[in-house]
């Protein structure tokens, strides 16, 4: 059955690969799956047709025959369960890889999204400068813990998995605010993720839709 | 194999059931599983023994023989996959229920956690009053979308699932700030969740550990 995902017709990041369709593209590339893309405009995401697919009016969505999914985590897990390359074969390793997916999305990403909100949506507010150190400290607490757990390993738990795919994708959001370089082990981890051929193909595919902006 | 989870020896919410062990207890009760609980102190969560189980120094963790998991979402999914009662039998329904788990944790909960942070950690800061309306608006945007998707249905997608368990658990955090009553359909949805015998048992079990505080 053919797979269709949705993506921004023009990503707010100008092609840096931070929009969440890149995570799904990466998973599909790791799994060797061909997919189609339907582009959606910023205003189109809030219209009834798209809301029928995604109740929160976001991208990506995933359509495969009659099945419609939203939420990047759920889509990546669905792909990982159906194809080799993203989850270990043994049940315990599989459960631990899925744990890292949830850790990326529910423990590491929330303070990073708070940082993005503080910069992009509240950057011109009177409290912005005074509040920023608190926001940064919350991100750093998580990064320190993650870096200590990763240690000198290549990946979070044995071979590369959907957990690493998600964690690397979340950490990539820290490159622009400059936090990643404070944690050399995490910076090297992200670089290992970016070096994977499947990531390269996913990044190029999203870039082809978006013109890059200067940093 | 016996199951052991961790929980606060004294929950910061004083027994209102908002600590994340309640979510895991609820899942285990829905699945009819017996479990043991090891209580951990606030300072004990940051010590090496506990960090070996949970790299971010939180509760709950889940131990079952050699398997150690952390992250509430991953633990609930692990339970749901192994026992009846929390996921539909058909593959598509199962994928959609898992989608709602991720939606609860990665789309609905982050702005709710931001609200908790604004109230509890930044409530005495000079910007607290001026910033609060922005934080509340972000929560309300998600609640409006969720309420429209739920409509007059009892549960998010057919029968009760792990997706509902997680969404109800996330929405329960809104009772103290009073936002839930603005959305009668969501308030009724949460009440349906709380009325389930498995939830009642989970709530009573966590309450037995904690003395209730006055609101």
Image (cartoon, coloured by chain):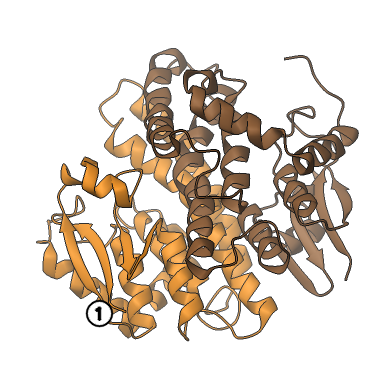
Chain colours: A brown, B orange
Query: Does residue A117 show up?
Result: yes
Quadrant (top left, top right, bottom left, bottom right) of the C terminus of chain A: top right
Q: Which residue is mark 1?
A: B201
Left or right of residue B107, residue B17 in this image:
left
Q: Taking A107 as reference, is B78 above or below it?
A: below
**Crowding near the residue tagged with mark 1, few <14, some 14–19, many ≥20 C-alpha atoms within 10 Å:** some
Residue drawn 62% across the image and 53% down it: A162
- Residue B99 lies, in percent from the top left, at 61, 64
Q: Taking B110 as reference, is B78 above or below it?
A: below
As drawn, which residue projects farthest toward the left?
Answer: B211
- Residue B148's quadrant in the figure? bottom right
- Residue A21 lies, in percent from the top left, at 75, 46
Quadrant (top left, top right, bottom left, bottom right) of the N terminus of chain A: bottom right
- Residue A60 lies, in percent from the top left, at 74, 51
Residue drawn 41% across the image and 65% down it: B75
> In the depicted view, which residue is nearer to us: B33 or B139?
B33
> In the depicted view, which residue is nearer to us: A138 or B83?
B83
- Residue A207 lies, in percent from the top left, at 85, 32
Left or right of residue A61, residue B56 in this image:
left
Left or right of residue A11, residue B1 in this image:
left
Q: Taking A153 as reference, is B192 above or below it?
A: below
**Number of marks in picture:** 1
Mark 1 secondary-structure assignment = helix
The chain letter for the residue carrying disc 1 is: B
């Amino acid at each position: 059955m053919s797979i269709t995902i949705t993506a921004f017709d023009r990503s707010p990041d100008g092609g840096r690969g931070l929009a969440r369709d890149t995570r799904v593209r990466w998973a599909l590339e790791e799994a060797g799956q061909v997919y189609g893309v339907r582009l959606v405009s910023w205003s189109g995401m809030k219209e009834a047709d798209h809301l029928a697919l995604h109740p929160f009016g976001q991208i990506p969505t995933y359509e495969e025959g009659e099945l419609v999914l939203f939420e990047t985590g759920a889509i990546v897990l669905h792909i990982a369960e159906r194809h080799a390359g993203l989850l270990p074969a043994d049940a315990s390793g599989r459960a631990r890889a899925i744990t890292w997916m949830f850790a990326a999305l529910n423990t590491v990403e929330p303070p990073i999204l708070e940082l993005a909100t503080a910069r992009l949506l509240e950057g011109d507010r009177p409290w912005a400068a005074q509040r920023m150190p608190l926001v940064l400290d919350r991100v750093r607490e998580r990064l320190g813990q993650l870096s200590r757990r990763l240690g000198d390993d290549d990946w979070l738990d044995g071979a590369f998995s959907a957990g690493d795919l998600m964690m690397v994708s979340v950490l990539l959001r820290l490159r622009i605010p400059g936090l990643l370089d404070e944690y050399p082990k995490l910076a090297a981890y992200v670089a290992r993720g970016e070096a994977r051929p499947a990531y390269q193909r996913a990044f190029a595919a999203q870039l082809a839709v978006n013109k890059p902006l200067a940093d």
